[in-house]
Amino acid sequence: MAYTKPGVTRNRIFQFVRQRLLDGEPPTVREVQTAFHMRAVQSAKSHLDALVKEGRLVKMPGKSRGYRLPGTAHSSRLAPILGRVPAGPFNIAVEEIEGYIPVRFNSEEQTVFGLRVNGDSMMNAGILHGDIVLVRSESEIHQGDIVVAMIDGEATIKEFHCVRNQIQLRPHNDAYPILSPKPEELTIIGKVIEVRRHLEAISLIDEELNG
Amino acid sequence: MAYTKPGVTRNRIFQFVRQRLLDGEPPTVREVQTAFHMRAVQSAKSHLDALVKEGRLVKMPGKSRGYRLPGTAHSSRLAPILGRVPAGPFNIAVEEIEGYIPVRFNSEEQTVFGLRVNGDSMMNAGILHGDIVLVRSESEIHQGDIVVAMIDGEATIKEFHCVRNQIQLRPHNDAYPILSPKPEELTIIGKVIEVRRHLEAISLIDEELNG
DNA sequence: CTATAAAACATACTTTTGTCTGTTATCATA
DNA sequence: TATGATAACAGACAAAAGTATGTTTTATAG
């Protein structure tokens, strides 16, 4: 390729590699080479080596397609969106799955699922009807956490409190009352860790990734 | 490895490969082999071949790490979260990147990025301070869309309207006024297609992938 | 203009990885 | 228990991809 000013091709190559990595398609050195019309493998490799030295890329030496963005410890997975609240805390797989959404995971085995919000009892907390909440089901619950609770077979999203050994489920909407269920008639499905709202229709519904 | 009932290892391998692909780390045949403690490469390869034949995987023959999920029409990519609003619509890469979040893509080249919400002018629309909005920058804008607009070098999120050739940017908070900027002092950065709120601290912040 | 550094090139070599041919063991079902 | 199908194994070869050494060209600064 034509000679460029120092750093120019370097940056272009970084952009290229980053895009490929974000697309889940790590490139080979030779793919970088041809993408930039270079006549020598080493031209691409020395740029990549420099990017690693600068800390802009990380590599796994010897491995093919071994360049990565630094600090990619946490990766994304697809979590199922459940149409209904799961009956028990552990039988998520059986429920009807509305679709999948990508979720960031920092550790390994976590039971996270999406749930479509029904009603506006949490309106003032910015959780609206139709939103999707991400729920981690095996989380510890603390004061003030927003939880998905099951009372008499009915699921609700409320803020959890416990005052004088009395459980309180507080809505964020003045039109709704604070609930004080007895422990035996209450099941905490999980803790809401994220709220998502799609302002534009997106086909969340993947074909079943059966297996 | 020990012999299993027909289909069992097949499914486990599919899960493994799918996970690796969703994580942006396409495996080699030999990586599958060792992950399942197989003593022959062919053991892994025949399973992978079968998965391709069943249509559960797709491959690029001869290429290393060449297995992919079929119908990658909508797969998830990592979109950058920008600390500031990008100056122009097309130079996202230059801006400072706060981190990355997984986003669903239905087609190919789309310019989607995340943006941290500053202020509560859209409070009544359930868009709170600190939320992350996903912005598609080259979208067509219609009446009622929520947009990211730049007025005099300052970025705001508002609802877009146009009445009698007069542009209106409407907040969703009675404490804020409706803005009516002249077209020449207004730049529409893009359209808000999704709102996300993390109720639990998640380390989105990757080290600077500056470029 | 000259010296130094960066960029690009050419070629060879090594390792990784995909692929092939054939064999043995286990499962499923009649 | 006989039989076809699936699973797992073994070893070898070929292609893909990483790496190394040295040279030529261009940019930048004094």
Image: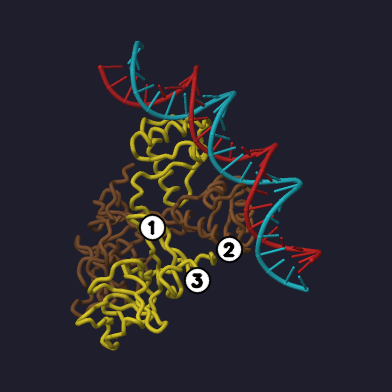
Chain colours: A brown, B yellow, C red, D cyan
Chain label for disc 3 = B
Q: Which residue is identified by label 1?
A: B109
Which secondary structure lies at badge 1? Answer: loop
Please name the residue shown 28% across and 47% down the image. A207
Q: CA distance from mark 1 to mark 2?
A: 23 Å
Q: Which residue is identified by label 2?
A: A8
For the residue pair B27 and D26, the one nearer the viewer reads as D26
Q: Is residue A12 visible?
A: yes
Which secondary structure lies at badge 3? Answer: loop
Chain label for disc 1 = B
Residue B73 in the image: above or below residue A136: above
For the residue pair B187 and A164, the one nearer the viewer reads as B187
Q: Nearer the viewer, mark 1 or mark 3?
A: 1
Residue A82 in the image: above or below residue B161: above
Mark 1 and mark 2 residues within 8 Å of each other at the beta carbon: no
Residue B27 in the image: above or below residue A139: above
In x, y percent, where is residue B53?
Answer: 36, 33
Q: Which residue is identified by label 3?
A: B96
Q: Are marks 1 and 3 on the same chain?
A: yes
Which secondary structure lies at badge 2? Answer: helix
The amino acid pointed to by label 3 is Glu
Q: Quadrant of the C terminus of chain B?
A: bottom right
The amino acid pointed to by label 1 is Glu
Residue B48 in the image: above or below residue A89: above
Q: Which mark is residue A176?
A: none
